[in-house]
Amino acid sequence: MFNLRLTRMPYVAAVVAAAALAGGCASGPDVRGDYDRAVDFGKYKTYNFLSTTSGNPAEFQSITQQMMQQAAAREMEARGYTRSDNPDLLLNFKGKLEEKTDIQSTPAPYYGPSFGYRGWYGAPYGAYGYGGTEVTTRRYNVGTLVMDVIDREQRQAVFQGGLEDVVTSKMMQDKEGTLNNAVAAIFAKYPFVAGQSTPVVPAEKK
């Protein structure tokens, strides 16, 4: 069995999307990425996935894992990497979907003096004002996806990318499309191609 102990890198999973929601709207996914600048990425030419090389016969791939790996394979091969049983790099995904609650309080409308209608004890409605606080509660789902790119020989992560976004019912209905977009967004932060040490900006997809 392949035992892997990762050295720690800065955790890049996003937090900005949740903060934007607190302001009342989502601004789209927050995507971040970082790589180890002490590593020569030019030595990497092949890849595979950690789950397929773990050596654990009891392990199985969920449909979600398969979708993410297929999306990642397209991205890696577009950058010139070749899938191998003895890879230079291992890719690993971690994700979660959680429900969050946004509670907002706003001052309730203030009603001024009445239009002459007198209430109990002769006091006009509104004579002492009427206010308070209106509370609005909104529940939504937030998905987080993190991808580690690991040097198999050194057993350390050399790149980590993360994405956080609000997951709508429409996105849940098109799970494959949503995961494809998420993986592509993370790879946009991975600035290398196979066999090249100098970071490059991947060509934009048309």
Image (tube, grey):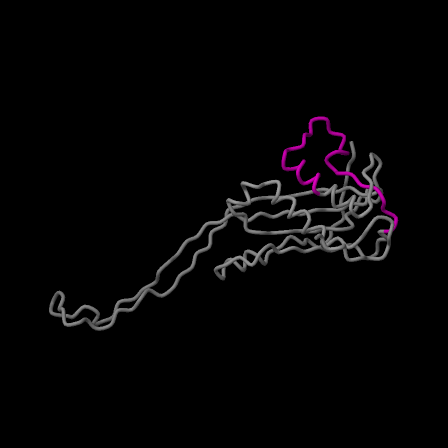
Residue 42 in the image: above or below residue 88: below
* Residue at (65, 55) in percent of width and height: 31
Residue at 77 percent across and 34 percent down: it is 53
Q: Position of residue 107 (x, y in %)?
A: 36, 66
Residue 118, horizontal then vertical, whole percent: 13, 69
- Taking depth in this image into account, of 171 and 159 the one nearest to the observer is 171
The quarter in which the N terminus is drawn is top right
Please state the total of marks drawn on the protein image. Answer: 0
Q: Nearer the viewer, residue 192 or 38?
A: 192
Q: Nearer the viewer, residue 4 or 47?
A: 47
Task: Pick whichever, 194 or 174, lies toward us.
Answer: 174
Q: Residue at x 63, y 44 (%)?
A: 179
**In this picture, is 201 found above or below 87?**
below
Q: Residue furthest front?
A: 206
Residue 49, position as x, y percentages in the image: 75, 38
Q: Most extreme residue toward the left, as rendered?
A: 122
Task: Give the residues drawn in magenta, as a range.
Answer: 42-71
Residue at image x 58%, y 51%? Answer: 165
Quarter where residue 61 is shown: top right
The image shows residue 180 at horizontal and vertical percentages of 65, 44
Residue 75 placement, left or right of 80? left
Find residue 72 and report its image quarter. top right
Residue 82 lies in the magenta stretch: no
The residue at the far top in this view is 57
Q: Find out whether residue 56 is within the magenta segment.
A: yes
